[in-house]
Image (spheres, helix red, strand yellow):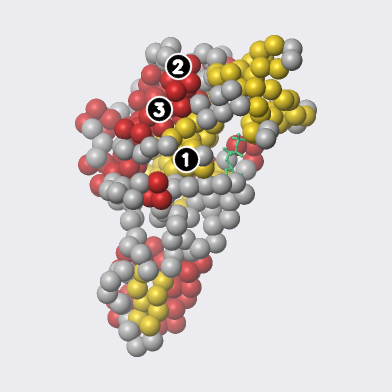
Amino acid sequence: MLDFTKLLPLLDHVEYRSGQQLATHFNVTRATIHNCMARIDALGIELERIPGRGYRLCAPLDLLSKKEIVTNLTAEVTACMHAFKCLQQVDSTNNTAFELEQPPSGSFSVVLAENQTAGKGRRGRTWISPYAANIYASVVWSMRRPMHELSGLSPYLAICVVEALHAMGLSGLSLKWPNDIYCNHKKLAGLLIECSGELSGSCKVIAGLGVNVAMKNYRNIEIDQQWTDIKSNMPGWELSRSQLAAQLIATVVAGLQAFEKKSVSDMVQRWAHWDLMCDSEVNIISESGVQHGIVRGIDAAGCLLLETKQGIEHIAIGEVSLRGSE
Ligand code: ATP
């Protein structure tokens, strides 16, 4: 059985590679190459096959490079990096990150993958994660704050990421409470914060981030809400996925450091700048039912401010979802 991840880097989007050439290179049969191509097909990567000439990619693949990522991190960030895994395929980067040992206080570990087979969203939902198309990253941090103080972390990191993407030249960005990043009213990225530890002591935080970069060339993408990717919104985008990954890792780490030091007093104003739903009528959906109201921003703990007939309610992140009500 030939591993498709060994074969993929040999495929080009200009030159054809013949089945025989590839079989000789790996010292396997042509049938093995054929099966491996079927595996690549199943990932949704578009391949062109011409009898007598061979195989080539329909579009260039921008694979992650651990070396390029590290080169693009500042010395300050690499100095506090404990472990770094850049993997091919995982069920979820958050799950893999949970298995890593807890990094020493003040340092971080990070897991990146080309593909998640069971990427996680909130409340048991799935994050669709096609191979080599996007960023799937999870940063592990030992947070010297008790778990009950972390409700603002998800919105806070979402602010940090949206500001970083804006600084990279992307426009039309906004935030949907508590953890979603939109671009021109379609979902571009999401965060999933998971924690373990004691309620009152410090805890292990996993900050998972999925950012859509270039999904257009992939078949079989089925997402049950409107979505978008960076390249459709910014045709002149020039960063490689590795360069983007480096900037996002640095952003999340800086956000975790600031949150730990409690230097996030401007969170409410910064959120207001990007708030997609501010002053909109919404429904808050939870196990116990649907609550209707008008969004009036967030409070300093990251709770949603919902104006209802009873007055302003502070909605905690927990197990609730926010949906527009029109
Ligand atoms: P909320 O967090 O308010 O409940 P949500 O439904 O957007 O909103 P999330 O957990 O943030 O929930 O994200 C999971 C959802 O995001 C999926 O159910 C799907 O609708 C959508 N989704 C899945 N993969 C992607 C992707 N790659 N890009 C954009 N959206 C996606």
Q: CA distance from mark 2 to mark 1?
A: 21 Å
Mark toward the start of the polypeptide (3 vs 1): 3
Location of residue 49 by image quarter: bottom left
Give the labeled residue for mark 2: 269
Q: Is residue 233 something that shows in the picture?
A: yes
How far apart marks 2 and 3 lie (CA) works out to 13 Å
Q: Residues within 10 Å of mark 3 (few under 14, many from 20)?
A: many
Q: Residue drawn 47% across and 32% down? A: 174
Disc 1 marks a residue whose amino acid type is Asn
Where on the image, by quarter, is ligand 1?
top right
Residue 151 can be seen in this image: no
* Label drawn at residue 184: 1
Picture coordinates of residue 249 (x, y %)? Answer: 35, 35
Please name whichever residue, 34 or 223, is drawn nearer the observer in this view of the structure: 223
* Cα gap from disc 3 to disc 1, whole angstroms: 18 Å
**What mark, if any, has residue 160 been given in the picture?**
3
For label 2, the crowd category at 10 Å Cα-Cα, with few meaning under 14, some 14 to 19 and many 20 or more, is: some
